[in-house]
Image (cartoon, grey):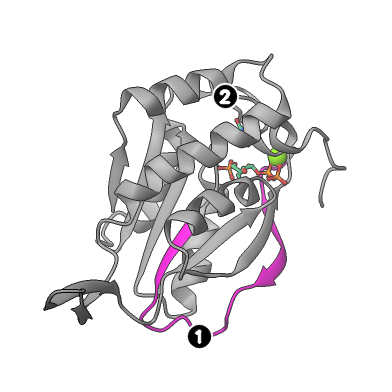
Amino acid sequence: MRVQVVDHPLVAHKVSVLRDKNTPSSIFRQLTDELVTLLAYEATREVRTEQVEVVTPVATTMGTSIAKPTPLVVPILRAGLGMLEGMTRLVPTAEVGFLGMARNEETLDIITYADRVPNDLTGRQVFILDPMLATGGTLAEAIKFIFDRGAESVTCICLIAAPEGVERLQKAHGDNDEVHVVLASLDEKLNEKAYIIPGLGDAGDRLYGVTPPPIS
Ligand SMILES: O=P(O)(O)OC[C@H]1O[C@H](OP(=O)(O)OP(=O)(O)O)[C@H](O)[C@@H]1O
Ligand SMILES: O=c1cc[nH]c(=O)[nH]1
Ligand SMILES: [Mg+2]
């Protein structure tokens, strides 16, 4: 497993505004969208391509095209949905599946409440979108879910991670070279409620302005 923290002043600036508790949902959504595009640029470096013939107005040349099967993007509902548009803007030919997952805030167990992902992912490069990697429970489960359907590789694009979550993924997938995690920030730690410190609070609530009932 490879972990990459994107070290760029624009990323650092936008993450700092996201963290601010006074940043309203409208700006939070916009910054999330912008950050995904910056992270996705790095995360897609190894996307499979093929050579194609291109006829310019003056010559014929060989060009590069994203190969089939096209990348599959999987946002983890709810918060990952805030990252979808930024990703598909950068990779418009990508296909999209959806996974609804929520952690029970008491037990920290993960509940998968929606599976809208194709059954057969044989040979596919999959990009999982979720802004927060806290205990790592959600992503560990999501990565396993995607590989169980036959995917070739999984790249997770997250905004903020806790070291505890990265360690959990290392334990689960450390020996798999086909797992890649791209982050905007690796924070200090988790607090006693498993929230990332300093973090930005609950990403879903901040994106959409509401706190849904607990899931069980
Ligand atoms: O690493 P973990 O400890 O599993 O926590 C991270 C998960 O928590 C958040 O989702 P949440 O369960 O709050 O659902 P939501 O997106 O609907 O708010 C976040 O978007 C991750 O999916
Ligand atoms: O800090 C955290 C931890 C889990 N989920 C979030 O949205 N934020
Ligand atoms: Mg939430």
Q: Is residue 23 above or below residue 63?
A: above
Residue span colored magenta = 107-128
At which x and y percent is residue 144? Answer: 48, 66
Instruction: Please report the residue visible at 20 percent of the width from the left and 80 percent of the height from the top.
Output: 55
* Nearer to the camera, 173 or 16: 16
Instruction: Please report the residue visible at 28 percent of the width from the left and 73 percent of the height from the top.
Output: 65
At which x and y percent is residue 67? Answer: 31, 78
At which x and y percent is residue 101? Answer: 67, 56
Q: Amino acid at mark 2?
A: Leu
Q: Quadrant of ligand 3?
A: top right
Is 119 part of what is drawn in magenta?
Answer: yes
At which x and y percent is residue 93? Answer: 46, 70
Indicate left or right for 165 with 18 as reference: left
Q: Local crowd at mark 1 within 10 Å, few (<14), some, or many (≥20)?
A: few
The residue tagged 2 is: 18
Indicate left or right for 28 with 11 as reference: right
Indicate left or right for 39 with 1 as reference: right
Q: Is residue 144 above or below residue 52?
A: above
Is 161 part of what is drawn in magenta?
Answer: no
Q: Amino acid at mark 1?
A: Asp
- Precedes in sequence: disc 1 or disc 2: 2
* Nearer to the camera, 116 or 44: 44
The residue tagged 1 is: 120
Q: Is residue 167 visible?
A: no
